[in-house]
Image: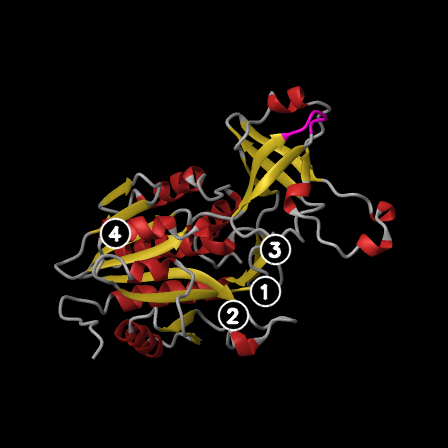
Amino acid sequence: MNTFNHFDFLKQLVETPSPSGFEQPVQRLIRQQLEPVADTIQTDIMGNLIALLKGRGGPTVMLAGHCDEIGFMVQFVDDKGFIYFGAIGGVDPHLSPGQRVRIHTDHGDVAGVIGKKAIHLIESKDRDTVIKLNKQYIDIGCTSREEVEAKIGIGDPVTFAVGLQPLQGRRVTARAFDDKMGAFIVTEVMRQVQHSGGIAADLYSVSTVQEEVGLRGGTTSSYGVNPDIGIVVEVTHATDCPDVEQNGIGRVELGKGPVLARGANINPALFNLLVETAKAENIPVQIIGVPRATGTDANVMQLSRGGVATALLGIPLRYMHTPVETLDLADLEMAIKLLTATLARVDSHTSFIPA
């Protein structure tokens, strides 16, 4: 584990709360990492963090990873002090009952639990029924609405109270690898490029916001940067665990390298450049076919303005949108190496027009 560069930064990223619309704490952390590296760095009106490393007359390249995570939002407090909430992003209501959570207020974090009727008290016919999210509630230990409202506010965001935990080998588990891991990678790539002396292209590293609620930050930042070339770094479903069907996704395994998507959302020349670079640098990659829009920031990036030569690089992830998302650190290292090497091959003469 100690051989992984900037592991502490990755740990800080995933443990810093950033539900969609509340990304400021994690963006401040990324800004601290990039300020010594980038030529310019700014935050736009949406909250996207946009860092630029100037090149030597080449095209404009944008790397994007979204920093927002799924979570909850406080919506109602009843007279007994129980807090009702809604979902931010795609939360699975199977998973939330019985979980510890943190409510992030203007005055600091408040610990709570999502309560659940004990199994002894549930009739047999109802034990397999999923409790709807609007019937679940958070208990922070207060006994009245007034006591709760002195501590929290309507609209406060909530996250699962879990951090990063090493497993066996290079594998780790945490909430919010989707997609703080992507924001981590695009930050590290800019750091590597700057350390190596720069590249021909103007390189933008963008930590986008509000992906989990509609690709919003990816839409606006792509329009604002107006890149010639764009690469989105995201998680992708690993299919090497039980009950995940490979025939609908492809063969995707932890520790076997980053995943390159191929399909209508992907520029074929840029895809080929990534594959050729991987071969030249002896970096293993996995390939999946995506016949439609990918459902990631790559979709809106490709369609921005007059169109962008777009690629999607994925990191295999187990248990997506749960508090125990699991990945292999080796895949992150290989992704950073692949992107850094690919960017070094891009100059003003590189064409990405399909032919």
Q: Nearer the viewer, mark 1 or mark 3?
A: 3
Sequence-wise, the earlier of marks 1 and 4 is: 1
Residue 25: x percent and y percent? 44, 38
Magenta segment: 77-81
Q: Secondary structure at mark 4?
A: helix
Would you name the residue on which mark 1 appears? 169
- Main SS, magenta region, reads loop
Sequence-wise, the earlier of marks 1 and 3 is: 1
Would you name the residue on which mark 2 appears? 255
Disc 1 and disc 3 in contact, CB within 8 angstroms: no
Residue 55: x percent and y percent? 17, 56
The front one of 126 and 207 is 126
Disc 2 and disc 1 in contact, CB within 8 angstroms: yes
Q: Quadrant of residue 134?
A: top right
Sequence-wise, the earlier of marks 3 and 2 is: 2
Q: Secondary structure at mark 2?
A: loop
The coloring applied to the image is secondary structure
Residue 133: x percent and y percent? 64, 46
Residue 311, compared with residue 30, is above or below; it is: below
